[in-house]
Image: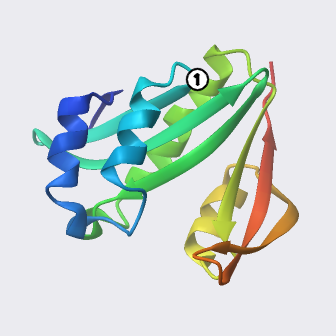
């Protein structure tokens, strides 16, 4: 599996197959993110096919994971873990001291993944997802 920076062409490919991924941001929001110098997105490629992606936003010394998505038919193959590790590595290379994220309180598999990487639950955002689902705020301190 290879990883590289996401391009607008990659976003166009992903957007034509949105039904292969979770319900996430619109094409317009992603396009804005790709042009924002504070945002860093990667794609996971397997057999010349995009199987997942993830991105962070960096403000000062903090990285926030905006999203990690793996194609439905490629889940449970450690792709999400590899994307997460790449995003943490990018955060380190940008001299961030910690990484934060939000995760649906009912998404036990994602919570377990983040905990396995050392993320700690530091709070909750009420009605964060679609105005009805709570999110845990999780944080990982990066060792320098």
Answer left or right for 136 relative to 16: right
Residue 82: x and y in percent read: 45, 43
In the rendered view, tell whether residue 105 sits above or below residue 27. Answer: below
Residue 75: x and y in percent read: 34, 66
Which residue is at 58% across, 26% downward? Answer: 89
Residue 16 figure quarter: bottom left
SS state under label 1: loop
Residues packed near mark 1 inside 10 Å, few (<14), some (14 to 19) or many (20 plus) = few
Which residue is at 17% across, 32% downward? Answer: 9
Quadrant in the picture for the C terminus? top right
Quadrant in the picture for the N terminus? top left
In this rendering, does residue 128 appear at all? Answer: yes
124, 94: nearer the viewer: 124
Residue 102: x and y in percent read: 69, 59
Which residue is at 61% across, 33% downward? Answer: 57
> How many marks do you count on the picture?
1
Answer left or right for 8 relative to 22: left
127, 7: nearer the viewer: 127
Seen as rendered, the residue at the extreme left is: 48
Answer left or right for 102 relative to 16: right
Residue 104 figure quarter: bottom right
In this rendering, does residue 78 appear at all? Answer: no
Seen as rendered, the residue at the extreme right is: 122
18, 49: nearer the viewer: 18
- Identify residue for label 1: 38
């Amino acid at each position: 599996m290879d990883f590289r920076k996401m391009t607008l062409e990659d976003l166009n490919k992903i957007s034509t197959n949105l039904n292969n991924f979770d319900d996430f941001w619109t094409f317009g929001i992603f396009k804005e993110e790709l042009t924002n110098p504070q945002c860093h997105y990667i794609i996971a490629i397997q057999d010349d096919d995009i199987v997942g992606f993830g991105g962070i936003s960096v403000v000062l010394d903090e990285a926030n994971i905006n999203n990690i998505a793996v194609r439905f038919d490629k889940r449970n193959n450690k792709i999400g873990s590899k994307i997460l590790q790449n995003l943490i590595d990018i955060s380190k290379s940008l001299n961030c001291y910690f990484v934060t994220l939000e995760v649906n309180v009912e998404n036990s598999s994602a919570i377990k993944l983040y905990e396995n990487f050392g993320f700690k639950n530091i709070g909750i955002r009420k009605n964060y997802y679609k105005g009805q689902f709570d999110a845990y705020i999780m944080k990982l301190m990066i060792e320098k």
